[in-house]
Image (cartoon, rainbow, N blue to C red):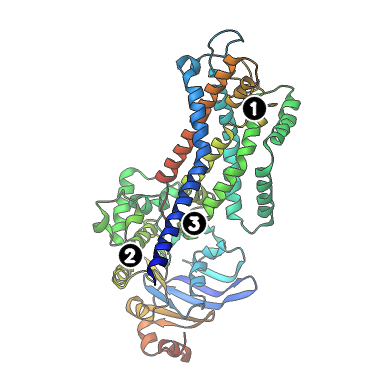
């Protein structure tokens, strides 16, 4: 009697597939829920004035988040300018000197840095740059964010370069190309998609960070382009407005959350494009 | 005796404490094909990697003795200069995957920061591809990526890339072992054509290939040079017993 057992197997098969689909759906549910919630609350305040105006004092209607958008972009710029060169060079070092004891020490430090809570990184940047200069500043915020980007960039660079076949390096060296030029003109271009992906993901990771900015960039109600002065950013603005007692500010916070989510989502989609388009086939 | 371009004198190589090459003495004749033959692990690849100092990529590698190119000790010259004079083609074709065919051929200039005017570049590319017998197949696709080519074409692209630097010596490390018989015979014909312009040192474990293309053959066994001489004589009347045993398949 084989027939019933086969029927049972088919039934099991269906049941199993259904459970998988259900669980997969459950895992994207929170994300869909957040998107829906923020969009429905935030999209109503989005208009040109919201994007281009400065925040207004309590009681006045309207006001925008232009300083926070500019501030976030500048903070990301500072963080990137500092962490990308350091991160890529460290990644090259790790992939080129896998056996060295300095490399394993570096790897341990990178893993530890990855696990350091963002608030602690904020305190470190506070002690380094705020206490020593005597002022909250965008620079200190950017450094704090950059420290958080570093481990992601280092790991992405190392892992990408490790996968590049040794014979490419040999091809270049055998043409009489010096070692530094081989690294810069052959190895790095061959790994560009992986490295850029790492950078973009690290930016997406820090774009919404609030804790390290609380006592570094600090926030500001004004438009500020001076990196040695306090600067506003989207997460700080959301934090300040959402915890305020004023309903109008709550709406602004929803709007700012929407902008931030769209930015991070866009960055992730762009990352996918980069990974596919710039991929080098060996 | 023919004129010698490369003279290897009392040359030994070590990886850590293990001796890989023992007291090699060899004179490579100019504008001829010299095959280096021997069983796996006999040190033939190490020997040619020592000739353009590629063995130095292994931090444990040390050498003693001298290798003279036109009378100049290559171990007293900057390895970068040595490698521009002594080109190399590897076992597995390794064109630069992010570059077009054109840029692959001119890579030796571009990567070294040597500036050429456009029509000079064009000339070098065409000349090198013609020498590598690849021009007719790729002239319409010069700006496509080199990795689209077949394995045999990729290997000829690598030969063109090496030839573009106008080396005096071209080292080939089992250049056909990853290729099918057709592509192999194509490369072999090419090597015979090339010997008018460049000295070729060919490492191979394929005895028939050594017999077909080479003018001279060196037989290496366990890091020692057993015999060196004109291929015709080596393959018909070897002087050493071990050479004969290897050629007749008694070991190796």
* Quarter of the figure that contains the N terminus of chain B: bottom left
Report helix, strand or loop for mark 3.
helix
Q: Is residue A71 above or below residue B142?
A: above
Please tell me how crowded label 1 is: few (under 14), some (14-19), or many (20+) other residues with Cα within 10 Å: many
Which one is in front, A56 or A80? A56
Where residue A114 sits in the image (x, y, percent)? 65, 44
* Chain letter behind tag 1: A
Q: Is residue B114 visible?
A: yes
Q: Rounded to the nearest whole Å, what is the CA distance between mark 2 and mark 1?
A: 55 Å
In the depicted structure, whether residue A17 falls above or below residue A255 = below
To which residue does mark 3 refer?
A169
Label 1 vs label 3: CA separation? 38 Å
Q: Earlier in the sequence, mark 1 or mark 3?
A: 1
Q: Disc 1 designates what residue? A: A139
Q: Is disc 1 placed on a helix, strand or loop?
A: helix
The tally of labels here is 3
Taking the spot 55% from the left edge, 52% from the top edge, the residue there is A159
Count neighbours of disc 3 (C-alpha within 10 A) and say few if under 14, some if 14 to 19, many if 20 or more. some
Residue visible at 69% across and 56% down? A101
Please name which of the two marks, 1 or 3, marks the residue nearer to the observer: 1
Residue B9: x and y, percent? 54, 74
On the same chain, marks 2 and 1? The answer is: no
**In percent of the image, x 34 and y 51: which residue is there?**
B145
Cβ–Cβ under 8 Å for marks 2 and 3: no
Residue at disc 2, secondary structure: helix
């Amino acid at each position: 009697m084989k027939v019933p057992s086969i029927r049972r197997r088919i039934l099991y098969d269906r049941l199993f597939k259904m459970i998988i689909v259900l669980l997969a759906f459950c895992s994207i549910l929170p994300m869909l829920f957040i998107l829906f919630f923020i969009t429905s609350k935030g999209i109503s305040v989005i208009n040109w004035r919201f994007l281009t105006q400065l925040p207004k004092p309590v009681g006045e209607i309207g006001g925008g988040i232009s300083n926070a958008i500019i501030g976030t972009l500048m903070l990301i710029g500072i963080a990137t300018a500092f962490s990308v060169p350091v991160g890529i060079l460290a990644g090259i070092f790790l992939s080129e000197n896998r056996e060295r004891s300095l490399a394993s020490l570096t790897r341990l430090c990178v893993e530890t840095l990855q696990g350091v809570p963002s608030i602690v990184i904020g305190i470190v940047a506070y002690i380094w740059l705020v206490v020593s200069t005597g002022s909250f500043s965008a620079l200190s915020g950017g450094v704090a964010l950059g420290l958080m980007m570093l481990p992601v960039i280092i790991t992405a660079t190392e892992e990408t370069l490790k996968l590049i076949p040794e014979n490419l390096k040999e091809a270049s060296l055998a043409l009489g190309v010096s070692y530094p030029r081989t690294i810069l003109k052959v190895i790095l271009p061959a790994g560009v998609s992986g490295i850029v992906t790492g950078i973009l993901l690290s930016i997406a990771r820090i774009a919404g960070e609030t804790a390290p900015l609380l006592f570094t960039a600090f926030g500001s109600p004004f438009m500020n382009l001076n990196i040695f002065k306090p600067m506003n950013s989207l997460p700080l603005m959301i934090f300040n407005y959402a915890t305020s007692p004023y309903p109008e500010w709550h709406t602004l916070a929803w709007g700012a959350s929407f902008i931030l989510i769209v930015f991070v989502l866009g960055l992730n989609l762009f990352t996918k494009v980069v990974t596919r388009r710039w991929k080098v086939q060996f | 005796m023919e004129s010698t371009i490369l003279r290897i004198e009392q040359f030994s190589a070590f990886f850590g404490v293990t001796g890989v090459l023992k007291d090699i003495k060899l004179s490579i004749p100019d504008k001829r094909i010299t095959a280096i033959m021997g069983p796996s692990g006999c040190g033939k690849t190490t020997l040619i990697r020592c000739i353009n100092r590629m063995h130095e990529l292994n931090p444990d590698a040390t050498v003693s003795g001298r290798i003279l190119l036109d009378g100049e000790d290559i171990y007293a010259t900057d390895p970068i200069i040595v490698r521009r004079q002594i080109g190399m083609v590897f076992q597995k074709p390794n064109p630069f995957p992010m570059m077009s065919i054109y840029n692959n051929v001119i890579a030796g200039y571009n990567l070294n920061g040597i500036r050429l005017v456009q029509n000079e570049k064009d000339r070098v590319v065409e000349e090198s591809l013609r020498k590598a017998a690849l021009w007719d197949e790729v002239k319409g696709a010069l700006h496509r990526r080199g990795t689209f080519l077949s394995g045999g074409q990729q290997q000829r692209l690598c030969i063109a890339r090496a030839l573009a630097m106008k080396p005096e010596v071209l080292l080939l490390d089992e250049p056909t072992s990853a290729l099918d018989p057709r592509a192999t015979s194509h490369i072999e014909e090419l090597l015979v054509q090339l010997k008018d312009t460049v000295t070729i040192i060919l490492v191979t474990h394929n005895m028939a290939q050594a017999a077909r293309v080479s003018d001279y053959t060196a037989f290496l066994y366990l890091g020692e040079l057993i015999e060196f001489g004109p291929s015709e004589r080596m393959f018909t009347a070897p002087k050493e017993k071990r050479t004969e045993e290897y050629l007749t398949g008694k070991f190796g």
